[in-house]
Image (cartoon, helix red, strand yellow):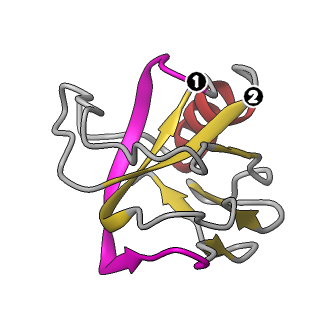
Amino acid sequence: MAGFTNYGENQVINKVLRESGQLYVGLLASDPTEGGDYSSEIKAPSYERVPINFIAPNLGETYNEGDLTFNTAAENWGWISYIAIFDSKTNGNMITYAALDFRKEIRAADIYKIPSAYFIFSLD
């Protein structure tokens, strides 16, 4: 097969990212690989995954509805290089992941925020 049509892409996005229950975003220090190894996810008392909701897809693309604001870091979280979507607030399964455009060091008192419409997911 050559690939999905725009309709097919939208159907996959709807089924996986919009209709499968609440999803969460997590921050990772290193590449989790396709195996979904999230052992490098931030481990700090003030860190927790944040819920994400996506808008209806168009032409195989969707993005976050609303800001994604992580807790204020009460301690240094270290460098983050990857971001992932999980099916659970803790543990669970990693559904998808991506490298950040820029690595970011999170120090005590920092707030990591992804503005609305900046977490873009697309199929082609």
Say which mark, if any, is on residue 105. Answer: none
Question: At x 60% / y 43%, what residue is drawn?
Answer: 49
Q: Look at label 2 and name its amino acid.
A: Gln
Residue 71 locus on image (x, y percent): 69, 59
User: What secondary structure do most residues of the magenta stretch adopt?
Assistant: strand
Mark 1: secondary structure? loop
Q: Residue furthest right?
A: 66
| C-alpha gap between disc 1 and disc 2 | 7 Å
Residue 45 locus on image (x, y percent): 55, 44
Question: At x 33% / y 56%, what residue is drawn?
Answer: 98
Say which mark, if any, is on residue 22. Answer: 2
Q: Quadrant of the C terminus?
A: bottom left
Pick whichever, 13 or 47, lies toward us.
Answer: 47
Does 118 appear above or below 60?
Answer: below
Tally of numbered tags = 2
* Circle 2 crowding by C-alpha within 10 Å: few under 14, some 14–19, many from 20: some
Residue 111 locus on image (x, y percent): 63, 75
Q: Earlier in the sequence, mark 1 or mark 2?
A: 2
Task: Assess whether residue 79 is covered by the magenta stretch.
Answer: no
Q: Look at label 1 and name its amino acid.
A: Asp
Q: Are marks 1 and 2 in contact (CB under 8 Å)?
A: no
Pick whichever, 38 or 59, lies toward us.
Answer: 38
Q: Quadrant of the N terminus?
A: top left
Say which mark, if any, is on residue 87. Answer: 1
Image: magenta residue range: 90-110
Residue 28 locus on image (x, y percent): 33, 51
Question: At x 79% / y 50%, what residue is drawn?
Answer: 56
Does 54 appear above or below 16?
Answer: below
